[in-house]
Image: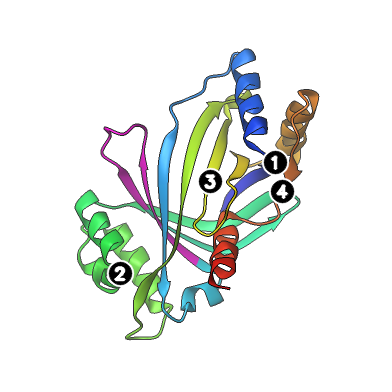
């Protein structure tokens, strides 16, 4: 179970103010990561109806880096009072295999037979078993994120996100913090922002939902 605090920031200025406040307090900002998030489902969106999300993420820390590729399966996400709880499984994919899947989503059906890692193969087979036999796979959506990790208190990491969604005019700004104790840590993060005059609100939608809303709006 992944548990994260998610707070929405109103504009780039708020994200910059948070970044500056962390530096001024002596915390370390790590190199920004450029992420491309691709989502896969059947053409009938069988997984979405079951509240299952399959994401392939490529990430680099600079333009010259070879991307890392992570396949993630999330289920039964609940976002309440700015705290997200979701069942999550992640596996790394070989770059050549991941790139072929990104180029041709229909390969998801045969992906389990092409990976060498048994954990990855089992996860992919479980996903395939959730949809009707013979279903056609598709790219269900995509968005990009510039993520800046930052050290914070008690060994925790803040993730400062700027996300762009096709069909959505404005970027989304968010700060996330993964923690096993959100009831204690969330007030500390809120106080950090409030004490520095940084506006924020509890996130009410995860990024997949934002992406889907942008898709629907663009199709009108």
- Residue 108's disc number: 2
Asked if the residue at tag 2 contacts the one at tag 4, i.e. Cβ–Cβ closer than 8 Å, the answer is: no
Other-residue count near label 2 (Cα within 10 Å), few / some / many at <14 / 14–19 / ≥20? many
Q: Which residue is mark 3?
A: 163
Residue for badge 1: 10
Between marks 2 and 3 in the image, the one whose residue lies nearer the viewer: 3
Query: Which disc number belongs to residue 88?
Result: none
- Label 1–label 2 contact, CB within 8 A: no
Mark 3 in CB contact with mark 1 (< 8 angstroms): no
Element type where label 4 sits in the image = loop
| Distance CA(mark 2)–CA(mark 3) | 26 Å
User: What is the x, y in percent for residue 125?
Assistant: 33, 71
Residue at which label 4 appears: 82
What's the CA distance linking mark 1 and mark 2? 37 Å
Q: Nearer the viewer, mark 1 or mark 2?
A: 1
Q: Residue at x 59, y 67 (%)?
A: 217
Q: Nearer the viewer, mark 4 or mark 3?
A: 3
Mark 4 touches mark 3? (CB < 8 Å): no
Q: Which residues are magenta?
A: 53-70
How much space separates mark 4 and mark 1, taking CA atoms?
Answer: 15 Å
């Amino acid at each position: 179970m992944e548990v994260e605090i998610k707070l929405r920031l109103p504009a780039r200025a708020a994200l910059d103010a948070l970044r500056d406040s962390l530096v001024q307090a002596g915390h370390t900002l790590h190199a920004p990561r450029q992420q491309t998030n691709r989502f896969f489902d059947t053409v009938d969106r069988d997984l979405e109806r079951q509240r299952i999300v399959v994401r392939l993420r490529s990430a680099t820390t600079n333009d010259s880096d070879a991307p890392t590729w992570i396949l993630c399966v999330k289920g039964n996400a609940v976002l309440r009072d700015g705290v997200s709880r979701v069942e999550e499984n992640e596996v790394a994919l070989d770059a050549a295999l991941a790139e072929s899947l990104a180029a041709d989503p229909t390969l998801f059906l045969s992906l389990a037979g092409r990976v060498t890692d048994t954990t990855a193969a089992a996860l992919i087979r479980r996903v395939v078993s959730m949809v009707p036999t013979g279903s056609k796979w598709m790219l269900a959506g995509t968005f990009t994120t510039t993520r800046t990790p930052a050290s914070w208190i008690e060994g925790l990491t803040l993730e400062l996100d700027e996300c762009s969604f096709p069909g959505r005019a404005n970027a989304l700004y968010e700060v996330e913090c993964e923690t096993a104790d959100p009831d204690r840590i969330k007030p500390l993060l809120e106080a950090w922002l409030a004490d520095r005059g940084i506006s924020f609100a509890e996130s009410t939608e995860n990024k997949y939902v934002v992406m889907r809303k942008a898709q629907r709006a663009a199709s009108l």
